[in-house]
Image (tube, helix red, strand yellow):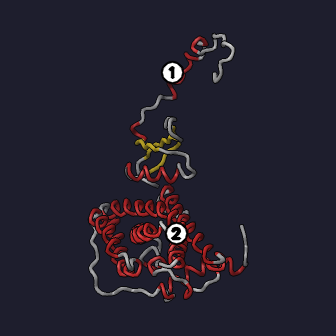
Amino acid sequence: MTTEPLWEVFVRPRRGLSHTHVGSLHAPDEVMALRHARDLYTRRQEGVSIWVVPAGAITASSPDEKDSFFDPAGDKVYRHPTFYELPEGVQHL
Amino acid sequence: MKPLELADDALIAAQRLSEWVSRAPTLEEDVALANIALDQLGAARLWLQGLGDEDQLAYLRSDFEFRNCLLVELPLGGYRGELDFGWTVAWLLFLSAAQSLRYKDLAGSDAVAAKAVKESAYHLDHATQWTIRLGDGTEESRRRIQAAIDEYWPYTHELTEGVRERWLSIVEPVLARATLTQPGEDGWKPSGGREGRHTEHLSYLLAEMQSLHRAHPGAPW
C-alpha cells in the first residue's frame, strides 16, 4: 500500500565492530528513515550507530552469476590458512 | 506541577495514542507511535506507584478524580473523533513540547522526570519531523494538520500554564518551518482538567480503559 521509498538499515552493535545489515523499512526521506530504524531495529539496545541507505543505491550480485562468482573458490583449499603447524602455546587462533 | 497531574497527563496520553496500534498509516509509524505510548505509560506508572496503588489510581478513579489537562483527553481526529494522523501529530507536538520542558525542570529533583526527559525529547523530535512534512507536504496533509492546530490551540493554554513563553519558543519555529499558520488568540482558554472538570471525551476513554479491571478486579495477563 505504501509508496514511500525503501531503505536498507545497517546497525553497528558496538564500538569497534562493523555496521551489519539488519533489515529494511519504508520512509519518506532519509531523516525519517533513520528515526524509524531507531524504533524498529534498536529497541533492545542492539546498536550504537545506524546507517540507512536507499535500497536503489545498492548494487547487488545477481543470483544468475552465482556459479561464476562463487563456485571457483570452492576447490581452492590453499586459500584457507590450514597448511600451518601451529606452534605450541599460540592462543586465539 | 504535582506528580498526579504529570501522571494523569502521561496516562491519558498513553491511552489515546494506543488507539493507533495496528492502525497507523505504515508499519514503521505503528511501531513509533506504540513506542511513544509505552514511554508515556511507563512514566505514568512510576509516578502513580509513588502516589499509592497504581491499579486503584488508574482503574478505579472516576473521571472527575483525574487531574490531566484537557488536551490529552481530546480525540485524535476531527469529525466524530475518527483517528487522523495529522491531528495526532499536532497533538503530540503540543504535548511533547510541554512535557519536555516540565521534565527538564524536574529532572534534578524527580527520578521519573530524569528518566522521561530523554524519551520526551524523542517524542518532540518525532512530532517535529512529521509536522514539517505534513505542513509543507501535500494540500491534503496541510489542510488536516492546520485544522488540528486551530482546534487544539485554545487547549494549549491549560497545558502550558507557567511555561507558555518557553513552549512558544519551541513550537513557533516548527510551525514556521512547516509553513503552517499559528492561530491568533481570541480569549477562549478552556481549562478545568486540573480541578477534575473534564470534557465528555475523558469518560468514554476511561470506560474503555477501565472496563476490564472493573469487571474482573485484579485480572492479570
Q: Is residue B73 above or below residue B28?
A: below
**Residue B208's quadrant in the figure?**
bottom right
Please name the residue shown 62% across and 79% down the image. B57
- The image quarter containing residue A86 is top right
Image-quadrant location for residue B121 = bottom left
Binning the other alpha carbons within 10 Å of mark 1 as few (below 14), some (14 to 19) or many (20 upward) gives few
Give the image location of residue B77, x and y in percent: 44, 74
- Amino acid type at circle 2 is Asp
Determine if residue B87 is in view. Answer: no
Image quadrant in which the C terminus of chain B is located: bottom right
The residue that disc 1 covers is A69
Q: At label 1, which amino acid type do we have?
A: Phe
Which residue lies at the image location 50% right of the left edge and 62% below the top edge?
B33
Q: Are marks 2 and 1 on the same chain?
A: no
CA–CA distance in space, label 2 to label 1: 60 Å
Vertical placement of residue A14 versus B128, above or below: above
Query: Above or below — where is B89 with respect to B9?
Result: above
Q: Which residue is mark 2?
A: B110
- Decide if residue B140 is on the left or right side of residue A14: left
Judging from the image, mark 2 belongs to the subunit labelled: B
Residue B111, placed above or below residue A82: below
Estimate how packed mark 2 is, as few (under 14), some (14 to 19) or many (20 or more) residues with alpha carbons within 10 Å: some
Q: Could you say whether the residue bearing mark 1 is in a helix, strand or loop? A: helix
Q: Of the residues tagged 2 and 1, which is closer to the observer?
A: 2
Q: Depth check: give the residue in front, B96 or B203.
A: B96
Of residues A61 and B216, the one drawn nearer to the viewer in this rendering: B216
